Image: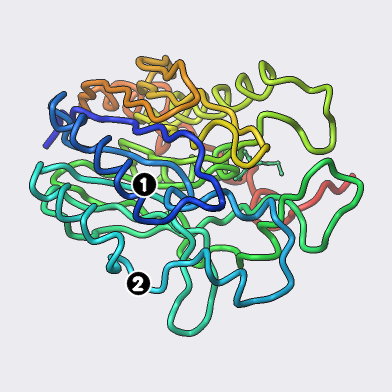
Amino acid sequence: MREWMIGAAQMGPIQKSDSREAVVARMLALLDSAAEQGCELVVFPELALTTFFPRWYMEDQSEVDYWFEREMPGATTRPLFERAREHGIAISFGYAELTPEGRHFNTSILTNRRGEIIGKYRKVHLPGHVEHDSERDFQHLEKRYFEPGDLGFETFDNDGTLMGMCICNDRRWPETWRVMGLQGVELVMLGYNTPSVNSQNAGEGLEKRLYHSELSVTSGAYQNATWAVAVAKAGDEDGHPLMGGSIIVDPDGFVVARADSEGDELITARCDMDRCQFGKTTIFDFARHRRIEHYGRITSQTGVER
Ligand code: CDT
């Protein structure tokens, strides 16, 4: 399949007290409206099933584990897979994953249009910190609750289109995009929970934060000649605002659909994967133009060395 009607299913806030069942009901409603609009793939946000719990400091591991899924699909999430299969819609969404070995990841999965999981990604670039930080206006404890993903940036053939995933902070890192670009990726899907306020710089402002998100996604799409879908969980979660700004971006780096609310909102675009070919065979023909003899620092060094 080379042409996909894609839906970006932005979700409004999820409060701590909201049940998983209530959230899944909202996702099912978004899936139904996606089906009405002819969508064949729907992308939901990072940690789509719960509030963005890493903003809360917890010491008790059983309290932490409450936010994690032990199986996918599980009893609560199975209706999503069933409804998606009934509609013939492939889906991707993020959730907190607790493996049988007791490992914790910030994960997203991808299904085909028959409701079968064909791809999994575990977030590599975990932002934030491990310990409670009283200097911040609010906490961002992803480094406390998750370990860095161990699956790399794989791509998956979904009925003839090569798809990849990353999650939130990953979008800000060109390495994320290039590793998938080097596999010929044609569609990158990502969800995010981005606070509207910088916890270390209250003056930064929403406009700049939206700009940096869009800049990251549009440049990643352009420089790798790929479609991209970036989907927010937005709005006020228990007094903590998350920004919206979900977008669908074409392989030239142009935004072709944009959400304008901070609530549950579906945006759509018809995406022809063959449009990736021009960039991939001309200015971003990697085989002809890349100069790997000068890129050693990318994989041998993390911080700046003068
Ligand atoms: N969820 C997530 O990765 N959020 C980050 C916030 C960074 S501030 C610690 C983001 O990059 O949007």
Residue 150 got which mark? none
Q: Percent position (x, y) of residue 168?
A: 54, 42
Callouts 1 and 2 close, C-beta under 8 Å: no
Badge 2 is on which residue? 71
Residue that protrudes farthest toward the bottom in the picture: 101
125 lies left or right of 182: right
Q: Amino acid at mark 2?
A: Glu
Name the quarter showing ligand 1. top right
**Residue at x 42% of width, y 45% of height:** 180
Q: Percent position (x, y) of residue 38?
A: 13, 27
**Residue at x 52% of width, y 32% of height:** 234
Nearer to the camera, 29 or 203: 29
Q: Percent position (x, y) of residue 293?
A: 61, 46
Q: CA distance from mark 1 to mark 2?
A: 22 Å
Q: Percent position (x, y) of residue 73?
A: 28, 65
**Residue at x 45% of width, y 15% of height:** 260
Mark 1: which secondary structure? strand
| Circle 2 Cα neighbour tier, 10 Å, few/some/many (<14 / 14–19 / ≥20) | few
In which quadrant of the rendered image does the N terminus lie? top left
Badge 1 is on which residue? 164
Q: Quadrant of residue 286?
A: top left
